[in-house]
Image: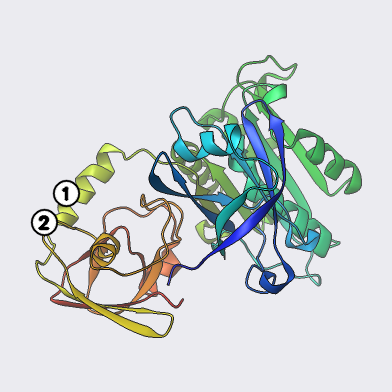
Amino acid sequence: MAKFQQVKVLDVYKETKDCTVVTFDIPDDLKEEFKYSHGQHLTLRAVIDGVEVRRSYSLCSSPLENTWKVAVKKIHGGLFSSYVNDVLRKGDLVDVMAPNGVFYKPADPTQSKYYIAFAAGSGITPVLSIIKTHLALEPESTFQLFYVNRSVKSIIFKEEIELLKNKYFGRFEVFHFLTKEKRDIELFNGRFTVDKLQKLTSRIIDVPSVDDCFICGPEEMIYMVREALTAAGLSRDKIHYELFTSGISDEDRKRTAAVLEKKVEGTDVTIIDGGKEFHFVMEDEYDNILDGALAAGADLPFACKGGVCSTCKCKVLEGTVEMKVNYALEEAEVSRNYVLSCQAVPTSKKVVVDFDV
């Protein structure tokens, strides 16, 4: 069951002119439920102009800080981001789902690791949580951050990043790239490009020594960085990424059309959630398990419905499905029969999925 808790806003402040940071006051009786790992996200729910809207936002705080904090960048036309930036105030109540997500690697104080991260704009939010946690818990580990923004004033968490540089001097390096302001070193002007990434992997990044890489930003950037690192010799299983928003590409449209051709009509679906079973038959007007289940009256966890956030992740126990798109699950998860229910098209007459994962 999609379990939201009504939580009070402890603090709200502007980090940049178009980015608001919200801290939630998690009461003692919910702290166990709301325990989180670095890199995870919260799903928020609000009724805006009479419509229920859900969005997932990464926690930028570290679990070591005993704080639940998210940063929300205002998007033109974005209902929820506008609500947070323009309306939300300290003391307001917000429906919040317990932390979720798999964009992290466990920290190990006995290890000495070399991490790198690439972020663009608000993509810094989960990356910051990851950096703070690993540097604090792994005294011998190091981190390099490559961070793209429009200008110095638009850099989210600029001051906190500088403080981290001082605190972990010699262990934490930051390389800022600006698209609207000129830097002295040409390499750091503009967005990441194939040429720049080749220079970074040959001059700054010691690719053979990298233990893990974290990437968060637009889809095009993520795949460009991933391919450049792979070409430079970094194993793909060391590259972890998370998309914030995604516009469907022509390739994904073709894949979606091909998957929908395989849809079996009238599939008998069993949902396992909270230890209970919910049965329904897929109606023709719905092409994915999540929408079919919600229409039948199920109360399931979801947020983006775009294959990005993984809030609706479940495991296929019986039958077959195919995903239209997948921007959230790693190959290892897919191989273990995990799917995004918002993208899962049934391709057999019976499907059983488990949300208790």
Left or right position of 323 against 280: right
Front one among 44 and 195: 44
- Residue 87: which quarter of the image? top right
Q: Report how far apart the C-alphas of labels 1 and 2 lie in the structure.
A: 6 Å
Q: Residue at x 83, y 59 (%)?
A: 136
Q: Which residue is mark 2?
A: 261
Q: Amino acid at mark 2?
A: Glu
**Residue 48: x and y, percent?**
44, 41
- In what element is the residue under mark 1? helix
Q: Label 1: few (<14), some or many (≥20) within 10 Å?
A: few
Left or right position of 332 against 157: left
**Residue 95: x and y, percent?**
54, 56
Instruction: Look at the image and tell me in which quarter the N terminus lies.
Output: bottom left
Q: Which residue is mark 1?
A: 257
Q: Residue at x 70, y 73 (%)?
A: 29
Front one among 144 and 340: 340
Q: Residue at x 75, y 50 (%)?
A: 143
Q: Amino acid at mark 1?
A: Ala
Front one among 64 and 230: 64
- Residue 71: which quarter of the image? top right
Can residue 112 be seen from the camera position used here?
yes
**Would you place residue 189 above or below residue 80 in this image?**
above
**On residue 235, which mark appears?**
none
